[in-house]
Image: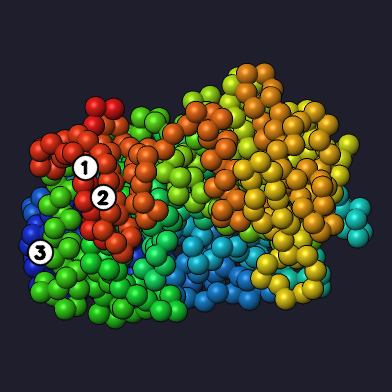
């Protein structure tokens, strides 16, 4: 179990370094991430490299028994680089460059940036590939975090090459994008530009492809650096840090390129429900690379610096959130950062070692957590215990949030609504792409798969026919992979499976809007009563049983929730977006039909239970004491457990027979 933080010794005088190592030993630190933003220190000018300081600090850490996650330092080019090569600067949709003085200002597709980055990584990798302190390589940092999309001339040229590789001919591009609309037809690739600032709506096919291109350019950067490290003879695992479900970068596509998944997680202490965000992150990271433990690469030990108000964590919250990650498959708990910065934009961001020193609650909690993590037994990777999967698809995310739809849909919030419902029902889930192997699961939720490929549709049909229970929600199976309608109307690929025909989408006024009109659609059936929003589709049940109908409003009497037996399984369709109570009602019904039980029955709302092999973790995220019925053996102390009483942010780690 790794424990540690980002470490930035270049921000401090060398006489502080031995003290850092001593305090790390006191805290139980086993690994630090080194050099993430050290480009300017390692390479003061284009033809000058200084590794003496890095040699010294790596040596000190190694002597102190602390391993190194060594970064490639390419996330923030120094000023000398962008002054000498201004073409490496990224640009916004108006073509205005992003200047140096912050971070992540480079154009990922720029040959100048890639050349300088490759030269730097080559030097680092050749020097440290065989160093015994280095146990992990950390490529770049948070790809795409601040600069989601680049519209520079470098991106323009690379986008044209990307299109040529993908489509071969400009005629194929025209067909995919439907460019006869608004006289957008292209005669050559030289006429294609990024979707820069325009008078009105962009072509949705182009927007979708530009999202694909952007993710691919960042992935190319990662691959180049990874391959340089491997070519230098490094055998250690290689990673880069993800950021939960992050729209600009298709992590499902990236996951196979990483040896180990790592994640950055910053729930808001102001939000009492923020522990569900941590659960979602953990389940997603575990699902991206099944069978391989992941790393919580960054979290805050206390307050951050970048929200409108930056609340501190409550006593015990640091440990509760860390243990939550371990329970969901993490084999490493790290922070940003080790020692709180004295200067710069993040000087108010907490660290493991605060400005106020070791006589602080933060330090005491950091040390206590280190001891507990060290006392944990060896834990297995994911053993496939989840019986429920929720489908999350990046390309659908990009397409469904294009403009000019019946109603704006926030895809991640909609997916999170179903995830949170499962979490409140204490059911463990995996988060998967729609083309994943669904055979291990009893229930699959497919929220709003607007863009549904033929392969994904076939996967869903096979899942149901083999005995699975599938819940499909509104605005699904609408367009193909180019964001074009298929012949024959909507829902054509799943029509026979679901037994319904969708005539229209019945858009409702968004709940945050002040415009007049219908905002909610009431849904009622046996044991079902809730308010739907955003969509109240006009659905015709052709070969399906109607379980609930719309009541009142323009959709009065129309089917709202249907089911159909197919093969050995069952398919459900929901024609609206339920509120929280509705999602729980419907999900409870689907789970019961499939025989899926909670991890632990009878848990209070703010308590969660997670299985990781034999380890059952129970965490109280609420403000009140909670009594939980659980039996087994204490994973830390070894004593028998027969029920536990948990104070706020307290937890129990119980080894069970299962």
The answer to which image quadrant residue 572 occupies is top right
Quick one: label 1 or label 3, which is nearer the N terminus?
A: 3
Q: Percent from the top left, x then y, of residue 576?
A: 71, 50
- The C terminus is located in which quarter? top left
Name the residue located 56 percent from the left edge and 53 percent from the top edge: 581
Decide: is 84 above or below 379: below
**Would you say the residues marked 2 and 1 are in contact, meaning their CB atoms lie under 8 Å apart?**
yes
Residue wearing tag 1: 643
Q: Residue lying farthest front? A: 526
Q: Residue at x 80, y 56 (%)?
A: 552
Q: Is residue 518 visible?
A: yes
- Residue placed at 87% from the left, 53% from the top? 179
568 or 211, nearer to the observer: 568
State the residue at coordinates (31%, 78%): 348
Q: Residue 23: give its label.
A: 3
Decide: few, some or many residues near mark 2? Use Cα within 10 Å; few <14, some 14-19, many ≥20.
some
Viewport quadrant of the N terminus: top left
Q: Position of residue 369 (x, y in %)?
A: 17, 55
Label 1 crowd bin: few (<14), some (14–19), many (20+), radius 10 Å: few
Q: Point out the frontmost of discs 1 and 3.
A: 1
Name the residue that disc number 2 marks.
627
The image shows residue 544 at horizontal and vertical percentages of: 76, 31
Q: Is residue 234 left or right of residue 590?
A: left
Q: How far is disc 2 from disc 3 in space, using C-alphas? A: 37 Å
Q: Would you place residue 150 above or below residue 548 in this image? A: below
Disc 2 versus disc 1: distance between alpha carbons?
A: 7 Å
Q: In the rendered structure, find residue 284 and report the number of the disc placed on it.
A: none
Q: Is residue 72 visible?
A: no
């Amino acid at each position: 179990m790794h424990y540690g933080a980002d470490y930035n010794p270049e921000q401090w005088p060398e006489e502080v370094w031995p003290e850092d190592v001593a305090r790390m030993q006191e805290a139980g630190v086993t690994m630090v991430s080194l050099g993430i933003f050290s480009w300017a220190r390692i390479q003061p000018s284009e033809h000058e490299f200084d590794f003496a300081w890095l040699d010294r600090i790596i040596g000190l850490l190694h002597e102190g028994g602390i391993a190194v996650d060594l970064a490639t330092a390419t996330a923030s080019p120094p000023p000398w680089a962008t002054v000498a090569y201004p073409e490496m600067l990224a640009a916004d949709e108006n073509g205005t460059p992003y200047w140096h003085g912050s971070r992540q200002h480079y154009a990922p597709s720029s040959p100048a940036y890639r050349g300088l980055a490759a030269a730097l990584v080559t030097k680092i990798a050749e020097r440290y590939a065989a160093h015994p302190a280095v146990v992990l390589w950390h490529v770049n940092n948070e790809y795409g975090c601040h600069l989601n999309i680049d519209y520079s001339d470098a991106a323009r040229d690379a986008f044209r090459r990307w299109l040529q590789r993908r489509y071969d001919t400009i005629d194929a591009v025209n067909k995919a994008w439907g460019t006869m609309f608004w006289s957008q037809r292209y005669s050559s690739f030289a006429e294609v530009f990024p979707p820069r600032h325009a008078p009105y709506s962009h072509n949705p096919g182009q927007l979708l492809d530009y999202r694909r291109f952007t993710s691919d350019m960042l992935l190319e950067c990662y691959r180049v650096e990874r391959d340089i490290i491997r070519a230098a003879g490094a055998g250690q695992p290689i990673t880069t840090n993800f950021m939960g479900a992050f729209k600009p970068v298709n992590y499902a596509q990236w996951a196979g390129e990483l040896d180990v998944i790592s994640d950055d997680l910053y729930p808001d202490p102001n939000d009492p429900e923020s522990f569900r965000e941590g659960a979602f992150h953990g389940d997603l990271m575990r699902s991206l690379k099944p069978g391989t433990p992941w790393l919580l690469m960054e979290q805050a030990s206390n307050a951050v610096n970048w929200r409108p108000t930056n609340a501190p964590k409550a006593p015990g919250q640091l440990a509760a959130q860390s243990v939550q990650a371990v329970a969901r498959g993490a084999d490493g708990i790290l922070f940003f950062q080790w020692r709180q910065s004295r200067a710069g934009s993040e000087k108010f961001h907490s660290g493991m070692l605060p400005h106020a020193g070791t006589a602080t609650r933060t330090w005491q909690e950091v040390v206590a957590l280190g001891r507990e993590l060290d006392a944990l037994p060896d834990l297995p990777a994911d053993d496939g215990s989840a019986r429920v999967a929720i489908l999350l698809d990046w390309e659908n995310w990009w397409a469904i949030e294009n403009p000019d739809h019946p109603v704006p849909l926030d895809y991640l919030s909609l997916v999170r609504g179903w995830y949170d419902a499962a979490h409140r029902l204490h059911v463990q889930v995996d988060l998967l792409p729609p083309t994943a192997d669904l055979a291990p699961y009893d229930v699959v939720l497919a929220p709003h798969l607007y863009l549904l490929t033929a392969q994904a549709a076939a996967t869903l049909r096979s899942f149901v026919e083999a005995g699975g229970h599938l819940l499909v929600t509104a605005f699904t199976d609408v367009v193909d992979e180019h964001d074009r309608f298929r012949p024959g109307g909507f829902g054509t690929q799943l029509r026979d499976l679901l037994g319904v025909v969708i005539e229209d989408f019945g858009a409702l006024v968004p709940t945050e809007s002040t415009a007049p009109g219908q905002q909610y659609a009431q849904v009622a059936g046996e044991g079902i009563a809730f308010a739907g929003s955003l969509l109240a589709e006009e659905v015709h049940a052709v070969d399906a049983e109607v379980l609930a109908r719309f009541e009142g409003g323009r959709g009065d009497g129309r089917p709202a929730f249907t089911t159909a037996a197919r093969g050995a399984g069952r398919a459900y369709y929901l024609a609206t977006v339920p509120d929280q109570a509705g999602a729980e009602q419907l999900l409870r019904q689907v789970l019961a039909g499939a025989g899926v039980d909670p991890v632990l029955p009878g848990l209070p709302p703010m308590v969660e239970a997670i299985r990781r092999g034999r380890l059952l973790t129970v965490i109280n995220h609420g403000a009140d004491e909670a009594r939980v019925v659980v039996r087994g053996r204490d994973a830390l102390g070894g004593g028998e457990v027969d029920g536990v009483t948990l104070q706020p942010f307290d937890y129990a780690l119980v080894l069970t027979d299962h």
